[in-house]
Image (spheres, helix red, strand yellow):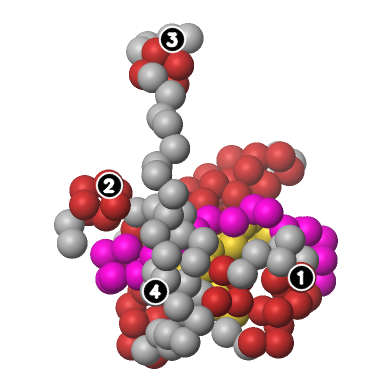
Amino acid sequence: MNTLDAIETRRSIKHYDPEHVMPEEDLAELIRLTKLAPSSFNMQNYRLLVVRDKELRAQIRAAAWDQAHVTDASVLFILCGDINSHLADPSDYWSHAPQEVQDMLGPMIKTFYEGKDQLIRDEAIRSSALAGMTLMLAAKGMGYDSCPMVGFDPEKVSELIKLPDGYVLSFMVPVGKLAKDAWDRGARLPDEKVVAYDTF
């Protein structure tokens, strides 16, 4: 499936085959593709939690309005953001760049983010969103379906997954094999309501 087909056919699927088990090689490939998502300064300040434990997923489902796709999908991914990535050694994510580039990026990143807590949090959410969209399109291209989810108690889910300090919970994405088609696609707003040119 090409990229345009994946975009056209991706839907937010709520009903999955609970018997399907994602092969380890598919999971590894899905993770590999997700990691190709763009991020600011290539900091990769998202974190991808893969939840397969059935008991834990049942607890998360209880904190997510009892939505069945939390437990029925083959895998539950939880996208989080790392709000301390800008403090890491740039060589962690620029190891392939020349040393002079690495030497330049360290101070640049520090200056860009220092003292800007809202920007840092926004960046963590943005990066996890980009990774999540990459995950969903990759899943579709591999023959799986998915659904971005924000309908859950973030404090309870954070507690259940033992989210460390310095991380922000963004959203969840169950991925699996479709058991029931989605409803007809919702109406899209006309261009004049969502598109502007040059200025607002």
Give the mark, 3 or 4, whose residue is nearer the N terminus.
4
Which image quarter is the N terminus in?
A: bottom left
Viewer-nearest of discs 3 and 1:
1
Earlier in the chain: of badge 3 and badge 1, it is 1
Q: Nearer the viewer, mark 2 or mark 3?
A: 2
Choose mark 2 or mark 4, whichever is in front. 4
Instruction: Tell me if residue 10 can be seen.
Output: yes
Q: Secondary structure at mark 1?
A: helix
Name the residue type under label 2. Glu
Asked if residue 184 lies left or right of residue 70, the reply is left
Report if the CB atoms under discs 2 and 4 are less than 8 Å apart.
no
Which contiguous range is marked in magenta? 139-159
Comparing marks 3 and 4, which lies closer to the viewer?
Answer: 4
Q: Is residue 18 left or right of residue 111?
A: left
Bin the neighbour count of mark 3 within 10 Å (Cα to Cα): few under 14, some 14-19, many 20 and up: few
Mark 4 falls on what kind of element?
loop
- Determine which quarter of the picture holds residue 170: bottom right
Give the residue at mark 1: 62
Q: Position of residue 38 (x, y in %)?
A: 40, 53
Which label is found at residue 8?
2
For residue 95, above or below residue 116? below
Label 3 belongs to which residue? 199
Residue located beneath label 4 in the image = 177
Callout 4: 10 Å neighbours few (<14), some, many (20+)?
A: many
Q: CA distance from mark 2 to mark 1?
A: 32 Å
Residue sitting at x 63%, y 43%: 122
For disc 1, the neighbor class at 10 Å (few under 14, some 14 to 19, many from 20) is some
Picture coordinates of residue 4 (x, y %)? 21, 48
Residue drawn at point x = 82 percent, y = 61 percent: 155
Left of 136 or right of it: where is 64?
right
